[in-house]
């Protein structure tokens, strides 16, 4: 983070003028002479000054959006801005868009609805793509906790509905596997896959495990699963 840069921008008379002229809905304010990373610095300062506002950055191309997001992360921290990428295929093309892109889009919407960010970075094409709008966080997140009453078959069915693929062994994001009273799965936004152990119809333990050697590591009290 670069608080000195933000403080310098916040002290500028020109910035105070812009902050006082942020347009209402349906209006626009055009700005110019902002080279390099200056637009990201201006937006970061506006986000600091206008704490109840949400901001959407519309970039020309995916590379521009990724660069803008990186600038915001450097200025504000990684939790302050999230990228909503465009699909890799056009709507009329037969090929499915990449699974990782779907995961990033779900993560972005979930982060936004959960109130963990106020800055969404995207592209013009991504905004034009039709997508289902969730009614709330319950459609985007499955919360699992140790001691929770939940049958393994019910969890497997829920994972199927969330778009996970059942495999003999979990080797990639978006997969799950069932072995007796154990369910392993790898969800989006998670550093490692998790292994859920059941005692009857109750979750007895949740552990991370290594995707390479399949060995369990850290024990967790709970986990939030995002859909595919």
Image: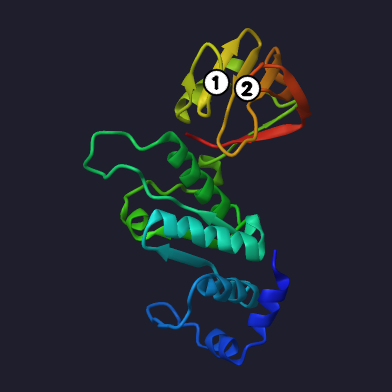
On-image quarter of the N terminus: bottom right
Residue at 53% across, 59% down: 69
Front residue (pair 144, 88): 88
Q: Residue furthest top?
A: 180
Q: Is residue 151 visible?
A: no
Tell me the SS state at disc 1. loop
Image location (x, y in percent) of residue 121 = 48, 59
Answer left or right for 100 relative to 116. left
* Looking at the image, residue 218 lies above or below residue 28: above
Residue 183 spot, x, y in % from top left: 62, 17
Cα separation, mark 2 vs mark 1, equals 6 Å
Residue linked to disc 2: 211
Q: Nearer the viewer, residue 144 or 23?
A: 23
Quarter location, residue 151: top right
Q: Position of residue 225 (x, y in %)?
A: 59, 34
Numbered tag placed on residue 171 in the rendering: 1
Residues marked 2 and 1 touching at CB (< 8 Å): yes
Asked which quadrant contains residue 119, the reply is: bottom right
């Amino acid at each position: 983070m670069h608080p000195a840069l933000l403080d310098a921008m916040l002290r500028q008379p020109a910035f105070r003028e812009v902050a006082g002229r942020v347009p209402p809905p349906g209006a626009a304010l055009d700005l110019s002479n902002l080279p390099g990373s200056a637009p990201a610095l201006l937006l970061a300062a506006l986000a600091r000054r206008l704490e109840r506002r949400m901001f959407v950055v519309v970039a020309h191309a995916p590379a521009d959006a990724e660069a803008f997001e990186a600038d915001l992360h450097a200025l504000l921290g990684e939790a302050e801005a999230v990228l909503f990428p465009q699909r890799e295929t056009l709507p009329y093309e037969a090929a499915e868009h990449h699974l990782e892109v779907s995961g990033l889009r779900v993560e972005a919407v979930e982060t936004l609805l959960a109130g963990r960010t106020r800055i969404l970075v995207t592209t013009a094409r991504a905004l034009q793509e039709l997508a289902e709008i969730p009614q709330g966080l319950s459609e985007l997140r499955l919360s699992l906790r140790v001691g929770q009453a939940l049958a393994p078959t019910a969890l497997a069915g829920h994972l199927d509905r969330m778009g996970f693929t059942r495999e003999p062994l979990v080797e990639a994001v978006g997969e799950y596997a069932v072995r007796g009273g154990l369910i392993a799965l790898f969800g989006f936004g998670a550093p490692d896959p998790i292994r859920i152990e059941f005692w009857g119809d109750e979750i007895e333990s949740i552990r991370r495990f290594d995707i390479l050697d399949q060995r369990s590591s850290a024990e967790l009290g709970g986990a939030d699963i995002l859909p595919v």
